Amino acid sequence: MKKLLNTLTIKEAHKGLVSKKFSSVDLTKACLDQIKSLDKKINAFITVTEDLALEQAKKVDKKIKSGGKLKPLEGIPMALKDNILVKDAKCTAGSKILENYIASYDATVVKKLKEAGAVILGKTNLDEFAMGSSTESSYFGSTKNPIDTKKVPGGSSGGSVAAVASDMCFYALGSETGGSVRQPASLCGVIGMKPSYGRVSRYGLMAMASSLDQISPTTKTVEDLRMVLDCIMGVDKKDSTTVDLKEEKPKKKSIKGMKIGVPKEYFIKGMDKEVEKRVREGIKKLEKLGAKMVDISLPHTEYALAVYYIVMPSEVSSNLSRYDGIRYGFTTVSKAKNLMDVYFETRRQGFGDEARRRIMLGTYALSSGYYDAYYKKAQQVRTLIKNDFDKAFTKVDCIVTPTSPTVAWDIGEKFDDPLTMYLSDIYTVSANIAGIPGISVPCGEAHNLPVGLQLLGKQFDEETILNVASEYEEYK
């Protein structure tokens, strides 16, 4: 049976364009048709940039017609989380406060994608300002899991991941602060990766927690993800935290003989038994591929969630202070008697519950008399968590863990219980705290829903975990 164009991988679509089996406009229309038929049900997109996408696709088709050589991502339709700026397109961050904000410049990753000939279909839904684990806190409504629309897709990049999982686009970019691409990738059954902190420029990404944020891709296959990462990574003078390590990229090595660490702290009470079973089966599969499993300990893992939920809201409190109703976005002056009233009323009406909750938590943690007890202490423990990983990587090449302790849960199930929601990030936050890369690959199903296997690597050693993930994915 002939595959529908929008269900192809990036590699398959690229081959088809080169051999002129179909055009970029054909691919784009196939994706736009899928969005039109499915998105009312799934709500993956906030904005669809149909005119821009067709214009970009026509340009690529002209190049094909004239015999020009195509780049790997050229003419391939994709989507972007709605906290990444695309010039002249709406960028809301899933919030009322930016409901009508139009971006005045391109993010560095968008500039790179445009230069690579990507076709931008639109901007995807997210938890407000990327704060959440279920894509339920968006001002524009919840995104649904394409596998079962009664379930959440995970978050905060639920829109990007759901768009890929439902074949509305070939790949998408999300952002990661504590697992916001890997966790939904696990819950929706696709590939999601967080590159090392500093590997991809954050310029043009709306800041949530600057020391944790990282733009991250989601795709249908590991090979596709490698192609997207190759395009977006690299040093950027507009982001001083980026590094250029292209020359140090290691050669592809086989998984055979590789030492893979299994941390005891990641297999804990409270984890879904069926999920654990699938992950253990995934570990056995890695052994069959020739890897040697090594039991390791990451002793400060138990503090990772506490550290994350002090550092992140503290930085949120600082970063979100720019949304004041004066410079851009939503404003209200109806009840204001002075400038301070404008700030307070705008922020009260413009921010949702979760954003307000995290701003207040962060402001408290940074306040006089509490800074040393909370933020400073959290940063000290953060160093211990990073040291655990550094020590582990002297013994092993990479680490394997579950991505999420459960499969996708019902919409509304955890929404009114923030602490239970925060626990869904328990396996992913450590990678952001330590600045290391992590990837989630599907490893079967539990309760008829996808389960993800997570691989963590040394900082700037994306190549190793991509190699392991690739062999794992191809092994039947």
Image (cartoon, rainbow, N blue to C red):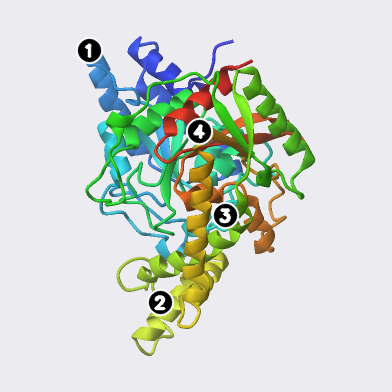
Q: Are marks 4 and 1 in contact (CB under 8 Å)?
A: no
Mark 4: secondary structure: loop
Query: Which residue in the structure is indicated by mark 3?
Result: 141
Dot placed on the residue nearer the N-terminal end, 2 or 3: 3
Q: CA distance from mark 1 to mark 2?
A: 55 Å
Query: What amino acid does circle 4 point to?
Result: Met
- The circle drawn on residue 406 is none
Circle 4 packing at 10 Å, graded few (<14), some (14-19), many (20+), is: many
Q: Is residue 89 above or below residue 467?
A: below
**C-alpha gap between disc 2 and disc 4:** 37 Å
Residue 345 in sight here: yes
Q: Nearer the viewer, residue 220 or 346?
A: 220
Where does label 4 land, which residue? Answer: 168
Q: Earlier in the sequence, mark 4 or mark 1?
A: 1
Mark nearest the camera among 1 and 2 is 1
Observer-nearest residue: 155 or 442? 442
Residue under numbered circle 1? 67
Circle 2 sits on which residue? 332
